[in-house]
Amino acid sequence: AQSVTQLGSHVSVSEGALVLLRCNYSSSVPPYLFWYVQYPNQGLQLLLKYTTGATLVKGINGFEAEFKKSETSFHLTKPSAHMSDAAEYFCAVSDLRGNTPLVFGKGTRLSVIA
Amino acid sequence: NAGVTQTPKFRVLKTGQSMTLLCAQDMNHEYMYWYRQDPGMGLRLIHYSVGEGTTAKGEVPDGYNVSRLKKQNFLLGLESAAPSQTSVYFCAGTSGGRAGELFFGEGSRLTVL
């Protein structure tokens, strides 16, 4: 069964600094990988996803993630943090079998300091 | 376009009471899901449906039942609420299968006293 580990339940960065949120996955087959963002008191919304093809994936709001099969990682980055990026971020994995639903990581709360 | 709508948004129950959460979608989603979100636990799948008339158990199904009589509605029921079911519940839907974007409702906050 697939699983996701997000390293760090809380990450704090200064405004303008690099954002790096870590995600490692476990899957016995090539996975589909996703990053979702949750703003306070809202549901989750898709940031970006990797299915096949180019391993560097660009998403909304300047975020991107790189699929590294050898490291079983899908880390999320943004070159310059903005105050509006403060939110909780979830990595998720889905494998290719049947109708297996997404499995989410426990989330990483990003704080941006002015 | 309403998207995915959950009702009610807030509810306080006493232990042993029953209630139903309604998820309604107007996006023609084939797949629908119920998750619960608890601090430090991320999202955990309760039940899901891959089409009208079908349901399946997720990671944490005990104490919950679901029904999908119509494609646009997915109901989550608590027959006898327990304090351990205090949580924020999210409904989500997708038409894209395994690679599809999940569209989430805004959540339903349930407190069981």
Image: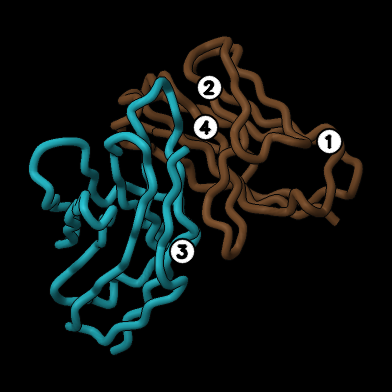
- Tag 4: Cα neighbours inside 10 Å, few (<14), some, or many (≥20)? many
Residue picked out by circle 2: B49
Please tell me whether mark 3 sits on a helix, a strand or a loop.
loop
Residue A91's tag is none
Tell me whether marks 4 and 3 sit on the same chain: no
Please name the amino acid that badge 3 sits on.
Pro
- Tag 1: Cα neighbours inside 10 Å, few (<14), some, or many (≥20)? few
Q: Quadrant of the C terminus of chain A?
A: bottom left
| Image location (x, y in percent) of residue B12 | 78, 52
- Chain letter, colour brown: B
Residue B33's tag is 4
Give the CA distance from mark 1 to mark 4.
20 Å
Residue picked out by circle 3: A40
Residue at the spot 45% in from the left edge and 47% down from the top edge? A3
Q: Nearer the viewer, mark 2 or mark 1?
A: 2
| Image location (x, y in percent) of residue A97 | 38, 24
Quarter of the image for residue B6 reads top right
